[in-house]
Image (cartoon, grey):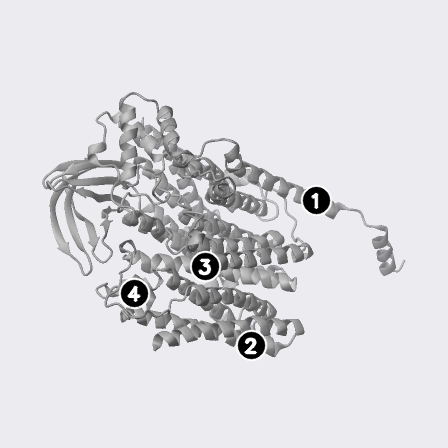
Amino acid sequence: MRFGRAGAALALALLGGPAAAVAPDEIISDPALEQRARAISAELRCVVCQNQSIDDSDAPLARDLRVLVRDRLKSGASDEEIRRFVVQRYGEFVLLRPVIGWHTAALWGGPILILTLAALGILSSRRKRAADREAPLTSEEEARIRAIAGS
Amino acid sequence: MIVEAGHYALTLALGLSLLQCAIPFWGARSNDPVLMGSAVPAAIGVAALVGFAFVALLIAYVTSDFTVLNVVENSHSAKPMIYKITGVWGNHEGSMLLWVLILALFGAMVAASRHLPVRLKTNALCVQAAITIAFLVFILFSSNPFTRVEPPPAEGQDLNPVLQDIGLAIHPPLLYFGYVGFSMTFALAMAALIDGRVDAVWARAARPWTLLAWSFLTLGISMGSYWAYYELGWGGFWFWDPVENASLMPWLAGTALLHSVVVMEKREALKVWTILLAILTFSLSLLGTFLVRSGVLTSVHAFAVDPARGVFILAILSIFIGGSLAVFAWRAPLLRGGGIFAPISREGALILNNLLLASACATVFLGTLYPLVLEAFTGEKISVGTPYYNLTFLPILLPLMLVLPLGQALAWKRGDLFAVVQRLGALLGVSIALALGLIAFTAGGPVLAPLAIGLGAFLLLSGAGEIWTRSHVRGRPVSVAFRRAVGLPRSAWGSALAHAGLGITVIGIAAQAWSSETITAARPGTQMSVGRHTARLDSVRPRTGPNYTEDVVTLSLWRDGRPMGTLETTKRLYPARNSPTTEAGILTRGFDQIYVSVGEIGTDGSVGLRLYDKPLVLLIWIGSLFMAAGGGLSLTDRRLRVGVPVRARGGVAAQAAPAGGAA
């Protein structure tokens, strides 16, 4: 773990240097379109990098994808259409927000499931504990008490 | 010669650890005080030997001894001295040696501690020796830093330029102190299970180690975050990278542990859970160390690169995690829960804290490892990134922060929620007013961020409020309240400080919603606006450093027509590795920063620039410093230094008297 961050940095250095990603010449003049481009880019993974979005990555492939996203936007494609197009080309691996499906059911459902199960576990252990405490004495125990009390 | 001596010392340390593990354990079984006592000198001896080995490697680096393979691969004679030293742990072998060194130092600290009951200490040192053995075997047989190279090259290959930064001197050692510190709580938990004795004395013994480890881990993560922020050049502070998650998981589990140990110490409740958490926290630390070291996080196939290492790592993980969980399953049913409490009570609140923290930790675990497991079983490749964690992790953590101030103010055993809400009402009101005011003031801007700022303010205020309610008596002058506040237990101050720190961090993160970014190409003389500021590119000129060359870009900044100063940002080339880095230029004013990084420098003299105006960004890390300081302050609490029955009272009472005060 010693490269908490440096690990990412390391991969980055190997893949073209950690410079600012979006270059001035890529930006579209229409600010609304550019904002959509940024939002889409932030959720697309640079496929040759270690866990970076194409918005953050300086790799040439990330740049190509950024340009592609912007070209499609300019030709009037919707965000969803662009995402679908990119997935078709590179597979689901490019989506930083995994799709919801059977193969990701445990991933998306996991947190809620864990929280619910843990909460139920706490409740049931409390109930069991309370039941333990309120359990009446067994006849053996009563006999022992009588013996101790000497009656 | 010194290199061989270091190697030899490491081998001796392995032998001594074997003795430290076996003999005192036997002594504890047969109740022989002499054999049990042998754990103490053995632990100190292991620390000395590993320390010697570390110094030997350090000398090889400092003198640029290129007959040592590790030095050749990670050093260069022209490298500045500080990076020659930090380069020792800037690679796999050296960092493992640092890990063991810290482990051995903690062992020596436990051995030297006179606050621990003898049997607990002995068993803990045995368990600790077992961990040392595993790591020493791993180093000696698959990651030896002392390997010589024949014939020696004239020059080294230099350290990765990204690592040639003061961050490497700070971040890994702090992080390792955190990871390894949790090995002590783990060893104590195993010792308690072995003896079947888990009580308030155990909790009191385990608490300082938990606090120490947690404070170091907090600092380590936070310093790593700041390092990434200024080194990676796009101004982010957390990337949900698997490597980061590997350190976040033990932190979340450790935070839960910190709170459950308190319940156990005060009320003898949550015993089984606390022991389990101690085991899980260290298991996650181990997992973190090895997941990162093995490279498996980047790709499942990384194991194939060096199968010997991979097998070692798997073996160590399964022996320690599997073994400790097996011991837990075997012995835990013997433990009996203690104190009774109502659901609405401090205990109840701390259980909620543990529920949410553990679930948050499990979420990060799922997000980090799910892609690996899916790929291993089905071959399908997916990515889990920031959007996933925003949707799953934050909704678990936010309620935790909302109930934190309430829980902090509830009484033990049976609390009065209504009274607490009344008491905190004013603070809550102020925080909501602040949030609403911000929304109105920044109409049309982000909506969630002001609410988050309100939450942060609530946390911050209630930290201060906690001290106030505990020290203020109605109708008495403020001076009395002040005296009482000074006399409060240090742990009360510590928790107030840490919770306030969390609030500060939340404010810092929320404020980033108002950061603004400018991407532009500029030439000398070009003016551009960056959020609330104006910047002008002054010059671009070359400069030569000790082992690199760089282009230095200088900018001047103004705010409302008044000059604020200049900043420098550079693009470096390290010829030894032929790799470029950028050094971000940062101008700090108050808690705000202006952050500039250089992109491409064109042949026509135009410079690609990325400029950010980041309001209150420093609060993110300042908050975490508060958290760590809170942990440190709790550590000095009187009751962690006195009160363990085995200790003769005289010396300790005299030591502690000035700190105790009127509490």
Type of amino acid under label 4: Val
Q: Quick one: label 1, few (<14), some, or many (20+) residues within 10 Å?
A: few
Residue B530 visible somewhere in the drawing: no
Q: Which disc number belongs to residue B309?
A: 3
Of the image marks 3 and 2, the number of the one nearer the N terminus = 2
The verdict on a common chain for dots 2 and 1 is no
Type of amino acid under label 1: Lys
On what subunit does the disc labeled 1 rest? A
- Per the image, the residue denoted by label 4 is B72
Q: Which disc number belongs to residue B145?
A: none
Type of amino acid under label 3: Arg
Distance of mark 2 from mark 4, alpha carbons?
40 Å
Distance of mark 1 from mark 3, alpha carbons?
46 Å
x 28%, y 53%: residue: B162
Distance of mark 1 from mark 4, alpha carbons?
63 Å
In the drawing, does residue A46 fall left or right of residue B180?
A: left
In the drawing, does residue B73 fall left or right of residue B200?
A: left
On what subunit does the disc labeled 3 rest? B
On what subunit does the disc labeled 4 rest? B
Distance of mark 3 from mark 2, alpha carbons?
33 Å
Is A136 in front, or is B537? B537
- Per the image, the residue denoted by label 1 is A128
Of the image marks 4 and 3, the number of the one nearer the N terminus = 4
Is B228 in front, or is B586? B228
Distance of mark 4 from mark 3, alpha carbons?
21 Å
- Per the image, the residue denoted by label 2 is B38
Of the image marks 2 and 4, the number of the one nearer the N terminus = 2
On what subunit does the disc labeled 2 rest? B
Position in image of residue B432 (x %, y %) = 41, 34
